[in-house]
C-alpha cells in the first residue's frame, strides 16, 4: 500500500484499458479504461546504429495501481499535462515493487520504439 505522502507526489492521472483478447486478424480487444494516480517522467532518447540515428520518447510511469495487475499488452493513455503532451505509448516492461509490508506500487517503462542493447 502506497503511503499518502508518496501518493501526493503522483500528480498525474493515467488511464489503462486492460487487454482482453485478440481477434483472428490480430486486432487487440480492450476493456473499459481505468484511471490511476501516477508520476510520469519522460525523456527524448537517440537510437543509433552504424548508419542511422532516430529520436524517440521514452517514459517511466510510477503507478498507484493498488495491487491491480497491469499487463504489457494493456492500452496505456498518458495525461495531457505531461511535458510531451497526450501520448499513447507501448508498454515495454511492468515491474511490481514491494516493501516490507508487501505490494507498494507498479513501475512501467514505455515508449514508441524499444532500444535493444548490442543490436546494430
Image (tube, rainbow, N blue to C red):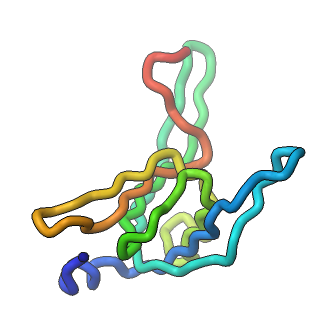
Residue 64 shows in the view: no
How far across and how far down the image is residue 56, in percent?
A: 57, 44
Q: Is residue 29 above or below residue 90?
A: below
| Residue 61: quadrant of the picture | bottom left
How far across and how far down the image is residue 118, in percent?
A: 45, 17
The one of 114 and 80 positioned closer to us in this rendering: 114
Q: Is residue 26 left or right of residue 63?
A: right
Q: Residue at x 31, y 66 (%)?
A: 105
Q: Is residue 51 left or right of residue 95?
A: right
Q: Is residue 118 above or below residue 14?
A: above
Q: Is residue 24 left or right of residue 56?
A: right
| Residue 113: quadrant of the picture | top right
Q: Residue at x 59, y 64 (%)?
A: 76
The one of 5 and 49 positioned closer to us in this rendering: 5
The one of 110 and 58 positioned closer to us in this rendering: 110
The one of 61 and 46 positioned closer to us in this rendering: 61
Residue 68 shows in the view: yes
Amino acid at each position: 500500500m502506497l503511503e499518502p505522502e508518496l501518493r501526493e507526489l503522483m500528480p498525474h492521472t493515467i488511464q489503462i484499458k486492460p487487454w482482453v483478447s485478440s481477434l483472428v486478424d490480430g486486432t487487440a480487444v480492450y476493456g473499459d479504461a481505468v484511471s490511476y494516480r501516477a508520476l510520469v517522467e519522460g525523456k527524448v532518447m537517440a537510437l543509433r546504429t552504424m548508419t542511422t540515428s532516430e529520436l524517440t520518447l521514452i517514459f517511466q510511469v510510477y503507478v498507484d495501481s493498488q495491487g491491480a495487475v497491469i499487463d504489457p499488452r494493456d492500452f496505456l493513455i498518458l495525461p495531457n499535462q505531461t511535458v510531451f503532451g497526450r501520448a499513447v505509448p507501448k508498454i515495454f516492461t511492468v515491474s511490481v515493487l514491494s516493501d516490507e509490508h508487501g505490494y507498494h506500487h507498479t513501475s512501467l517503462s514505455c515508449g514508441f520504439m524499444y532500444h535493444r542493447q548490442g543490436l546494430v
